[in-house]
Image: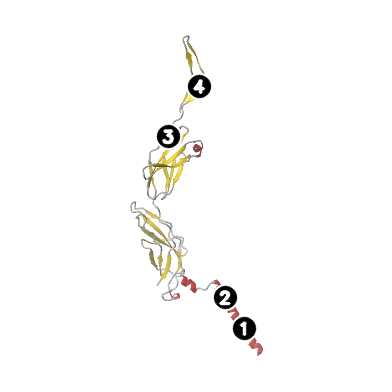
Amino acid sequence: MLLFGIRIQAINEIGAGPFSQFIKAKTRPLPPLPPRLECAAAGPQSLKLKWGDSSAKTHAADDTVYTLQLEDRNKRFIPIYRGPSHTYKVQRLTEFTCYSFRIQAASEAGEGPFSETYTFSTTKSVPPTIKAPRVTQLEGNSCEILWETVPPMKGDPIHYVLQVLVGRESEYKQVYKGEEATFHISGLQTNTDYRFRVCACRRCVDTSQELCGAFSPSAAFVLQRSEALLPGDVGSLDDPKMKSMMPTDEQFAAIIVVGFATLSILFAFILQYFLMK
């Protein structure tokens, strides 16, 4: 956009007349050039793209509208966003896949050219969170921990990390890492609280990267004395059979009431016997 000052003069056979007053005029601005496209954040199913200067002061005075296009499987660009924003999150994408984009800026001067093609890739998904493991007491001071399995993800194998929190310790310690979905641990102590948790990890074959999901809820376990267990009836405190052997609060209260009633009747008979004599 350029500013010009224009004046005019008339000339004939008599001579040249005076110049007119200046008139100011300016050319129309050129259509805006496309901004540089960048990937601000990448996820397994999304890409957050940004472009231009997104500061509040610049954005308030900017009347530019942007058109963002995505290349489909047929190598055709389709519009996925049009507006004044400087960011856009593309969702419902496939993990570990490359996507191509281009962008165009438009203003009162018209639509500018499209940018070059930019290609960005989504990341790989982490394994899902596993349910709390099951803990079963075995003979001796040992127990067995079992957990659900996760199938391979896009050809990448899955392994597991098992951790335990002992007593009043503040940090979990790793006791197992491998592909099996069960683990035996020995050397446990009675009257000690144990909490077990497990997570699934994805070993990426093509990148040698390890992606671990969140840890499961913890499973509590207390080792019972061996003489308190009937032969062939071993289990954790969470075993329904073990819970059924313990009286409930209501049953315990009823036992106390019956005991007091029995003692009262017995004392009444004894007192009546001595009074009659």
Residue occupied by mark 4: 23
Please determine whether, in this image, residue 174 is positioned above or below residue 16. below
Kind of residue indicated by mark 2: Ala
For the residues bearing labels 4 and 3, Cβ distance under 8 angstroms? no
Q: Residues within 10 Å of mark 1 (few under 14, many from 20)?
A: few
Please determine whether, in this image, residue 204 is positioned above or below residue 89. below
Residue occupied by mark 3: 112
Dot 3 or dot 1: first in sequence order is 3
Q: State which mark lies toward you, 4 or 1.
A: 4
Kind of residue indicated by mark 1: Phe
Residue name at image x 60 percent, y 81 percent: 263
Residue occupied by mark 1: 267
Q: State which mark lies toward you, 3 or 1.
A: 3
Q: Secondary structure at mark 1?
A: helix
Kind of residue indicated by mark 3: Gly
Q: Secondary structure at mark 2?
A: helix
Kind of residue indicated by mark 4: Ile
Task: Give residue 112's position: percent from left, percent from top.
Answer: 42, 34
Residue occupied by mark 2: 254
Q: Quadrant of residue 73?
A: top left
For the residues bearing labels 2 and 3, Cβ distance under 8 angstroms? no
Residue name at image x 47 percent, y 37 percent: 65
